[in-house]
Image: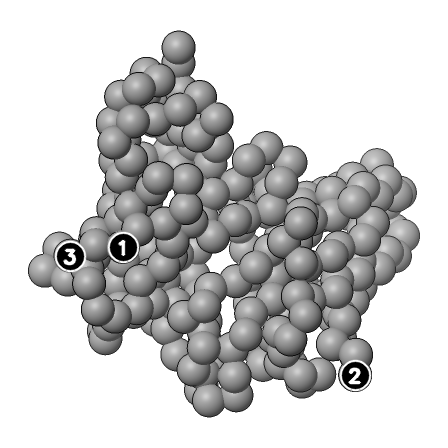
Amino acid sequence: DSGVTQTPKHLITATGQRVTLRCSPRSGDLSVYWYQQSLDQGLQFLIQYYNGEERAKGNILERFSAQQFPDLHSELNLSSLELGDSALYFCASSASTRTGKGGGYGYTFGSGTRLTVV
Amino acid sequence: AQSVTQPDIHITVSEGASLELRCNYSYGATPYLFWYVQSPGQGLQLLLKYFSGDTLVQGIKGFEAEFKRSQSSFNLRKPSVHWSDAAEYFCAVGARSGGYQKVTFGTGTKLQVIP
């Protein structure tokens, strides 16, 4: 157990639907990162939150959104789903601070949510 | 912006043989460097990291990596591979971006271990 909890582990849904993926970071970590992993795209950074605020955006589609709540858990919302959105979605957390120090601790990853769009 | 290159997509080694996985990075300053391992259906697990000091770093599971600034490399090594090491390995480089850490992952190297 890495300390980062992701739910659900598996999700099967139809095209056009909306889903919410949840992540609880490791205790004490303020930063949460979302990644998408697919066979053809590899590991793609989606978005980062620090203590409730969005801090960096990567290759996140407009149909996707995320937020981090006061208790530091995060949710990734995927809407108008397409077949190509089928992938593993990982959440990671880190002890990085606002000054950027502490990022050298590395990320702790959850075990992911496997999303299948049919 | 930083970048990471893992030139080998697949590597096959015999159990008991030595292993070296290559990683080259691009970054203007001294970066944070990481190696992660991902077993099938699992998340990424941190093997080791470097950000200062001794350029040879030891990690978990008997792995080590050496930072070579002149070659912009951070290759992962293990003297004797076990069948359980079969997995995908990701090199990553971290750098400050707007006051926050940004980590960029390589495309990964899949390791197959044959008896």
Chain letter belonging to callout 1? B
Q: Which mark is residue B57?
A: 1
Write the residue at 47% across / 64% down: A106
Q: Which residue is mark 2?
A: A70
Residue farthest to the left, as pictured: B70
Foreground pick, B18 / B13:
B18
Q: Earlier in the sequence, mark 3 or mark 1?
A: 1
Q: Is disc 3 surrounded by few (<14), some (14 to 19) or many (20+) residues within 10 Å?
A: few
Foreground pick, A73 / B4:
A73
Chain letter belonging to callout 3? B
Residues tagged by mark 2 and mark 1 found on one chain of the structure = no
Q: Is residue B106 visible?
A: no
User: Residue B86 location, x and y as percent?
Assistant: 46, 27
User: Residue B84 location, x and y as percent?
Assistant: 48, 26
* Residue B43 relative to residue B108: left or right: right
* Residue B80 relative to residue A46: left or right: left
Q: Is residue B64 above or below residue A118?
A: below
Q: Which residue is mark 3?
A: B68
Q: What separation in Å lies between label 2 and label 1 (alpha carbons)? A: 37 Å
Q: How is the image coloured?
A: one colour
> In the rendered image, which quarter is residue B112 located in?
top left
Amino acid beneath label 3: Lys
Write the residue at 88% across / 57% down: A18
**At numbered mark 1, what does the secondary structure look like: helix, strand or loop?**
strand
Tell me the mark number nearer the camera, choosing from 2 and 1. Answer: 1
Foreground pick, B9 / B58:
B58
